[in-house]
Image (cartoon, helix red, strand yellow):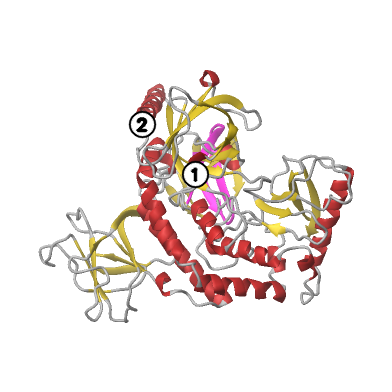
């Protein structure tokens, strides 16, 4: 790198730092101000730092102030997470209050997480939607997650989500808390809180599943096992595993150990959002004290891999992450009967409420999301409403596909229409409206119709609108895109066009149909790097030749950033199949 370029990079970095320092909260959400002792940076996931905090509700209804700038409250804070801690500049944190507090309207507790969701390029909707579906389907407890903005040591660090952590407590996982080093055979059966884990950092037991795959069970409560506890847990998990992998799928003996109804609810939520890591890690189970008690899946936690694929298969089919047990469980007719029963009742009941929840949630955090995108441009969710439309479109397709597999009638409110418009005129329109008609019915209102939302579609500017017609549309429905005025020859509107759901249009007509989810959220630009001399691919492998050791920054098609450490010379990285953006170019692995 030349000296001039080094100077330019240093100046650019300095400008970024100064710009971030000048940013203030949006004023549309509560703000949490945290100051560590001596303004010490938070660098550890293990060791808490002493700090103080105060919460300013900013006039938000139902939120009480805690402390003040003049009289802040004590707090301890440390890092948390695995990939989300190491892979992003916007960090998640674990906080511990000095006294139990109903922070942000949550139930009283000392223990919370501040989740950054830097890996969520779907408008911060992954956890929000997954958690809400969990509540709606009737899981015993789902963590509360409250959006707020955070200022850390005087630096605005963006939009965060105060989230109740998973722990044994009467207001969280409500089971008996089994003591550490328990040697009493009468009480060793409960209560247990476990995680099916994909990391081996924390204390755990392992059970061979099949084909040399070993399942890791990290125990959260109790935290230290006696020999009796270790033997009981290992024996129990082994018995469940053997029953699940029995060749006789008509004999569902593992139902003696696991609550099928709660498992069905947990599983359905994972399928709706297509969370293909759901039984791979951050998969919790708990068991109450008592020989007749059963293991209950849940609570739900991490939906960081939701919405990544267009829904065309079950979560345990053909994906890069191993799914513990669930693929085998679904081979048992007795379990699938429970799944279909819960599914059909959920669809016929309140499922369609999720769309209104998404709209309200997006409106609530929209301004803060824009400000967060200024602070963290790599993780841009600047157009929250466009991202919400993408998520709703995804859910509609997912539910439609699952209904074909499991049955159940899709509520009419889910039968929405989405269209896209690329303005290829010599003078682009400043606004784009869509006007729809069908036998005298105008679902988007009278001329000129309703505003479309500006989005980024495959790296190019575009517009999108989603609507749910009250009347079923015929095959003769039409659509006109316009700039709010009339006249084809004057360039104010398109000609009459046929309405095609998921159609992509320009001023001349339809140019394609969206086959998967839209790139409705902005994909960040990719920085160049002089040390990279050659990039190529073959199926499942990214090949990089470098002139020196360096970090390679790539993005998935939905905007998630991945950092790879490339050494000098020839590098080959095994990657999941998909579309990746490397130095501004798209590669299909």
Whether residue 539 appears in magenta in the rendering, the answer is yes
Residue 313 falls in image quadrant: bottom right
Quarter in which the C terminus is drawn: bottom right
Could you tell me residue 280's position as x and y percent? 66, 54
Residue 158 in the figure: left or right of residue 26: right
Residue 510, relative to residue 149: is it above or below? below
Between disc 1 and disc 2, the foreground one is: 1
Query: Is residue 517 in view from this perspective?
Result: no
Numbered-mark total: 2
Residue 18 falls in image quadrant: top left
Q: Which residue is mark 2?
A: 23
Could you tell me residue 189's position as x and y percent? 82, 53
Q: In whole angstroms, how far apart are the C-alphas of marks 1 and 2?
A: 27 Å
The magenta stretch spans which residues? 533-556
SS assignment for the magenta stretch, majority:
strand
Quarter in which the N terminus is drawn: top left
Q: Which residue is mark 1?
A: 105
Q: Residue at x 39, y 44 (%)?
A: 61
Disc 1 packing (10 Å; few <14; some 14–19; many ≥20) = few
Q: Residue at x 70, y 50 (%)?
A: 195
Whether residue 400 appears in magenta in the rendering, the answer is no
Residue 459 in the figure: left or right of residue 262: left
Residue 111 in the figure: left or right of residue 231: left
Mark 1 vs 2: CB contact within 8 A: no
Could you tell me residue 499's position as x and y percent? 29, 73
- The one nearer the camera, 333 or 90, is 333
Residue 154, relative to residue 589: is it above or below? above
- The one nearer the camera, 229 or 543, is 229
Tell me which label, 1 or 2, sits earlier in the chain. Answer: 2
């Amino acid at each position: 790198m030349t000296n001039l370029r080094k100077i330019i990079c240093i100046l650019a970095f300095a400008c970024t730092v100064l710009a971030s320092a000048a940013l203030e909260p949006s004023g549309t959400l509560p703000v949490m101000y945290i100051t560590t002792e001596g303004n010490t940076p938070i660098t550890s996931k293990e060791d808490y730092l002493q700090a103080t905090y105060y919460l300013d509700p900013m006039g938000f209804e139902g939120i009480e102030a805690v402390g003040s700038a003049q009289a802040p409250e004590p707090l301890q804070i440390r890092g948390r997470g695995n990939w989300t801690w190491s892979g992003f500049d916007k960090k998640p944190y674990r906080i511990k209050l000095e006294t139990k507090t109903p922070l942000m309207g949550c139930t009283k507790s000392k223990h919370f997480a501040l989740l950054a969701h830097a890996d969520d390029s779907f408008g911060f909707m992954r956890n929000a939607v997954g958690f809400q579906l969990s509540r709606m389907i009737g899981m015993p407890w789902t963590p509360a997650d409250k959006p707020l903005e955070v200022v850390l040591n005087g630096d605005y660090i963006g939009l965060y989500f105060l989230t109740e952590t998973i722990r044994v407590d009467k207001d969280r996982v409500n089971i008996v808390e089994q003591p550490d080093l328990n040697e009493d055979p009468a009480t060793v059966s409960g209560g247990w809180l476990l995680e099916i884990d994909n990391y081996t950092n924390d204390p755990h037991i392992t059970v061979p599943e099949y084909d040399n795959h070993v399942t890791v069970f990290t125990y959260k409560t109790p935290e230290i096992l006696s020999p009796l506890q270790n033997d009981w847990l290992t024996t129990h998990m082994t018995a469940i595993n053997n029953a699940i992998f029995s060749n006789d799928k008509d004999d569902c003996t593992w139902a003696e150990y696991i609550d099928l109804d709660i498992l069905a609810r947990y599983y359905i939520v994972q399928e709706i959002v297509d969370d293909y890591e759901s039984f791979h890690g951050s998969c919790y189970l708990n068991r109450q004290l008592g020989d007749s008690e059963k293991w209950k899946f849940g609570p739900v936690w991490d939906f960081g891999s939701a919405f990544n694929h267009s829904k065309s298969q079950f979560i345990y089919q053909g994906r890069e992450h191993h799914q513990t047990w669930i693929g085998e469980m679904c081979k048992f007719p007795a379990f699938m009967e429970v799944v279909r029963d819960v599914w059909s009742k959920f669809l016929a009941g309140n499922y369609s409420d999720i769309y209104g929840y998404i709209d309200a949630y997006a409106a609530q955090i929209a301004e803060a999301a824009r400000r967060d995108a200024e602070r963290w441009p790599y993780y841009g969710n600047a157009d929250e409403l466009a991202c919400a439309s993408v998520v709703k479109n995804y859910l509609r397709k997912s539910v439609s596909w699952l209904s074909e597999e499991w049955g159940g009638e899709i509520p009419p409110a889910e039968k929405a229409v989405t269209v896209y418009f690329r303005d290829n005129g010599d003078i682009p329109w400043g606004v784009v409206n869509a006007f729809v008609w069908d036998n005298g019915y105008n679902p988007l209102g009278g001329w000129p119709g309703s505003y479309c939302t500006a989005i980024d579609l495959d790296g190019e500017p575009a517009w999108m609108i989603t609507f749910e017609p009250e009347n079923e549309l015929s095959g003769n429905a039409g659509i006109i895109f316009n700039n709010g005025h009339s006249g084809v020859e004057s360039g104010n509107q398109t000609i009459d066009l046929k309405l095609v759901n998921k159609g992509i249009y320009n001023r001349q007509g339809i140019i394609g149909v969206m086959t998967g989810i839209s790139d409705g959220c902005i994909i960040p630009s990719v920085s160049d790097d002089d040390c990279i001399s050659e990039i190529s691919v073959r199926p499942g492998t990214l090949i990089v030749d470098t002139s020196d050791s360096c970090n390679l920054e790539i993005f998935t098609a939905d905007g998630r950033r991945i950092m790879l450490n490339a050494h000098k010379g020839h590098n080959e990285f095994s990657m999941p199949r998909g579309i990746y953006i490397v130095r501004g170019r798209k590669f299909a692995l």
